[in-house]
Image: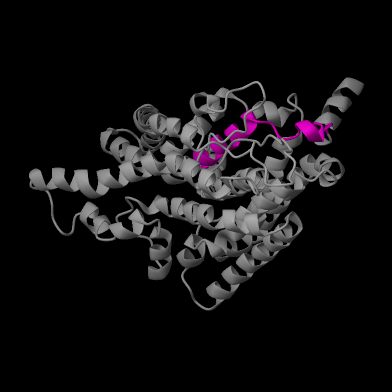
């Protein structure tokens, strides 16, 4: 009995990793978090099964209908990891150049290769085959192509107040939010002290929530508050606050032991509020407003827990499982390709199959096909470009004048996998390029 009680106590209130080891160079469970995020997105976009009244089916449908929160998880994780990288390299020679260059060689190749495919190669094929018309979905998407080339598609959707009907590149809105964050956030982190950065993050969280309420009350469409970067800053800033806190020698030992309890409490709060006010219901006023904030709090608690609990903790082991690790490794390309894969599977599924079987076959096939596309993308496009990172090394060994070098290894995983692990004294800097395949 005492053994069981001790195990339960260690899961709810575990011994934390020491501060100097609290942020690993590479964290397997945070790879799993990225895998969970893309799995939620896949369920929301691609799992369409009928309600047969069977309790497991009802649970699966509920989770799938709330799968849109996977993007919120991506934002929180990105805010956490990107802010951590910036905090550990600011004030050093090459801070700005290194960050942007390493982000560019990780993100741009696949992104722009996809745009070339949609806006150049596919139209040429349609024209040569005699299928090209002004009303074709690809032609309608192509009419807005310049917004995509400059990562402004989220602004376009917000300005129009609606999602494009053709739905070919609708999901690219979140990639625009990420890129806009990458361009501005390094300047802010470099300019502010950690104390003032913490204050700014708190202010931005409150402003984003307040703006969503005010804009929706004034009659703005939900997509406007959903897609604009400034109205989504609470998700990014919750992650940033976590990154700041876990690098504070006072905060870490006095606070992180409460993360598992905070995770449980925030999860119960999220579910409890959803019962009376549907904060997990897609495109609902509750979700567009308070929902994003509660979801960000829950996911920040999850990431904080996984970043500080020992390796034998049940959550650490669970998020380190191979299926989640695999989805996390290829999450960027899976996210990019999953709607194309779903369209292919939808056309291949036998019409004679029942609706339930069709739904599961489409979903399973979409995952496998997305993984195949992602593996090809990783081998042919992403990995070759990642080798260019050697020309823009992390500035972790070049402190500013009068500043001591403090090696605080960061956790490596982000919305778009970074491969920006800080090298240890015994590991070559570029070993991360071939090891984990992260955004």
Which quadrant of the view contains residue 189? bottom right
Is residue 312 placed above or below 75 in the rendered structure? Answer: above
Q: Residue 408 in the image: state x and y as whole percent.
A: 72, 36
Q: Residue at 62% across / 27% down in the picture?
A: 320
Q: Is residue 139 left or right of residue 108?
A: left
**Percent x, y of residue 196:** 73, 61
Residue at the extreme right: 2
Colour logic: one colour
Q: Residue furthest bottom?
A: 218
Instruction: Residue at 39%, 59% (x, y): give it.
Output: 153
Q: Nearer the viewer, residue 344 or 62?
A: 344
Give whichever of 57, 82 is nearer the camera: 82
Question: What is the tally of numbered marks visible in this picture?
Answer: 0
The segment highlighted magenta reads 14-40
- Residue 82 visible? The answer is yes
Name the residue rendered at 65%, 28% in the picture.
318
Percent x, y for residue 426? 65, 21
Query: Residue at the spot x=54%, y=27% of the render?
Result: 432
Q: Residue furthest front?
A: 401
Q: In which image quadrant can residue 207 be found?
A: bottom right
Is 259 covered by the magenta stretch?
A: no
Task: Confirm whether residue 67 shows in the render.
Answer: no
Q: Nearer the viewer, residue 6 or 34?
A: 34
| Residue 209 percent across, percent down from the top left | 63, 66
Please state, as top left, top right, bottom left or bottom right, where the N terminus lies in the image.
top right
């Amino acid at each position: 009995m005492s053994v069981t009680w001790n195990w339960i106590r260690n899961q709810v209130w575990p011994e934390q990793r020491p501060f100097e080891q609290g942020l690993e160079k590479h964290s397997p469970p945070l790879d799993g978090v990225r895998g969970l995020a893309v799995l939620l997105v896949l369920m929301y976009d691609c799992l369409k099964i009928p309600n047969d009244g069977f309790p497991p089916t009802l649970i699966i449908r509920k989770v799938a209908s709330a799968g849109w929160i996977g993007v919120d998880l991506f934002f929180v994780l990105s805010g956490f990891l990107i802010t951590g990288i910036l905090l550990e390299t600011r004030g050093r020679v090459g801070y700005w150049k290194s960050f942007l260059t390493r982000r560019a060689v990780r993100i741009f190749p696949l992104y722009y290769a996809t745009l070339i495919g949609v806006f150049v190669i596919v139209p040429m094929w349609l024209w040569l085959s005699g299928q090209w018309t002004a009303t074709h979905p690809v032609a309608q998407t192509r009419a807005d192509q310049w917004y995509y080339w400059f990562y402004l598609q989220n602004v376009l959707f917000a300005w129009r107040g609606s999602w494009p009907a053709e739905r070919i590149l609708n999901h690219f809105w979140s990639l625009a939010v990420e890129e806009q964050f990458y361009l501005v956030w390094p300047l802010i982190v470099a300019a502010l002290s950690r104390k003032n950065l913490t204050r700014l993050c708190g202010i931005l969280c409150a402003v984003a929530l307040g703006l969503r309420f005010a804009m929706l009350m004034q009659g703005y469409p939900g997509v406007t508050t959903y897609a604009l970067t400034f109205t989504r800053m609470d998700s990014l800033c919750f992650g940033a606050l976590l990154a700041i806190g876990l690098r504070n020698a006072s905060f870490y030992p006095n606070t992180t032991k409460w993360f598992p309890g905070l995770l449980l409490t925030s999860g119960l709060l999220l579910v409890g509020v959803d019962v009376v006010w549907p904060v997990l219901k897609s495109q609902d006023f509750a979700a567009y407003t308070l929902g994003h904030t509660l979801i960000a709090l829950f996911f920040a608690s999850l990431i904080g827990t996984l970043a500080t609990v020992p390796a034998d903790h049940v959550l650490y082991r669970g998020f380190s499982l191979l299926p989640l690790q695999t989805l996390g490794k290829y999450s960027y390309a899976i996210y990019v390709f999953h709607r194309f894969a779903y369209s292919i599977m939808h056309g291949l599924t036998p019409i004679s199959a029942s609706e339930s079987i069709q739904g599961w076959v489409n979903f399973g096939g979409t995952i496998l096909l997305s993984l195949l596309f992602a593996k090809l993308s990783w081998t042919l496009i992403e990995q070759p470009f990642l080798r260019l990172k050697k020309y823009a090394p992390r500035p972790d060994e070049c402190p500013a004048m009068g500043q001591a070098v403090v090696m605080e290894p960061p956790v490596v995983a982000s919305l778009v996998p970074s491969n920006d692990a800080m090298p240890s004294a015994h590991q070559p800097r570029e070993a991360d390029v071939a090891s984990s395949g992260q955004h």
